[in-house]
Amino acid sequence: PINCAIACEERMDKIKVVGGKPLTGTIAISGAKNAALPIMAACLLSEEELTLSNIPGLKDIQSMCELLEQHGVEVTQSGKSGKEGSKARSITFDAKQVSYVVAPYDFVRKMRASILVLGPLLARFGEAKVSLPGGCAIGTRPVDLHLKALEQLGAEIVLEDGYVNAKAPNGLKGAEMISRRLKPNCAIVIDVTHDTNSPMYDKKKQGDVSCNKGPTITY
């Protein structure tokens, strides 16, 4: 058994690092995909142009661009990623002409982050229809956090034929949601309603984010 283990280990790919020398140099850091995707979806909130720079040239970024374009967003990309990372790469979004509030399964199935367009569409237009990433079954997918949060903001949500049908006839109102499925001792403030009458408005304005025993998300 020992000889076999040695033989198997010799056949495995490995990286051999030889030390003894100081490491020097500069590495270009590209923008984070998981940070870029929610910001890209947020362009749906406003008619003003949004330009993002240092955007990584990844498949999910392109998929989000295609999803936004089918909603009516004009997407203009410039620059390319290279040895200097993605500093020279930028994308401009113009959502003035958005009129289509449905995110079809053919787009959403490519990337679970497509669910991020649900909140902005609902906040701006009062309705949205977004396919579930995995069809009809939510299971333990984190998408249910979005749905619960939107319901607490005042949204009416119905799941039908694999789609999330959401409406907010009275608009969205600020609310506080405590979740046990996030990392402890952290709080996130997200302003999507611009509701100056919300009890959380002053906290958002002042940047007052307090930590407690359970993680709190304030929308």
Image (cartoon, rainbow, N blue to C red):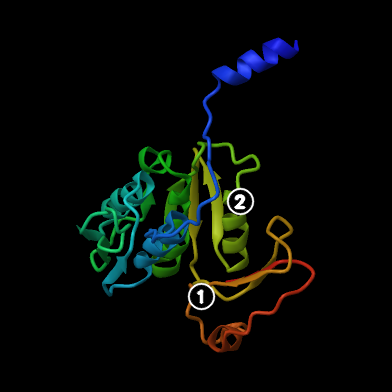
Q: How far apart are marks 1 and 2 (CA)?
A: 20 Å
Query: In the rendered structure, which amino acid carries the disc numbered 2?
Result: Asp
> Crowding near pointer 1: few (<14 within 10 Å), some, many (20+)?
some
The residue wearing badge 1 is 191
Q: In which quarter of the image is the N terminus?
A: top right
In the displayed structure, 150 sits above or below 208; it is: above
1 or 2: tag closer to the N-terminus: 2
Please, which residue is most extreme toward the right here? Answer: 213
Question: Is 121 positioned to the left or the right of 215 in the image?
Answer: left
Q: In which quarter of the image is the C terminus?
A: bottom right
Please report the residue visible at 57 percent of the width from the left and 57 percent of the height from the top. 146
Across and down, in percent, residue 163 comes to: 48, 44
Please, which residue is most extreme toward the front here? Answer: 20
Across and down, in percent, residue 89 comes to: 26, 60
Please report the residue visible at 63 percent of the width from the left and 66 percent of the height from the top. 152
Query: Disc number at residue 175?
Result: none
Please report the residue visible at 50 percent of the width from the left and 39 percent of the height from the top. 162
The residue wearing badge 2 is 144
Which quadrant of the figure has residue 10?
A: top right
Please report the residue visible at 35 percent of the width from the left and 65 percent of the height from the top. 44
Across and down, in percent, residue 39 comes to: 41, 64
In the structure shown, which secondary structural element does the residue marked by tag 1 occupy? loop
Which quadrant of the figure has residue 50?
A: bottom left
In the structure shown, which secondary structural element does the residue marked by tag 2 occupy? helix
Query: In the rendered structure, which amino acid carries the disc numbered 1?
Result: Asp
> Crowding near pointer 2: few (<14 within 10 Å), some, many (20+)?
few
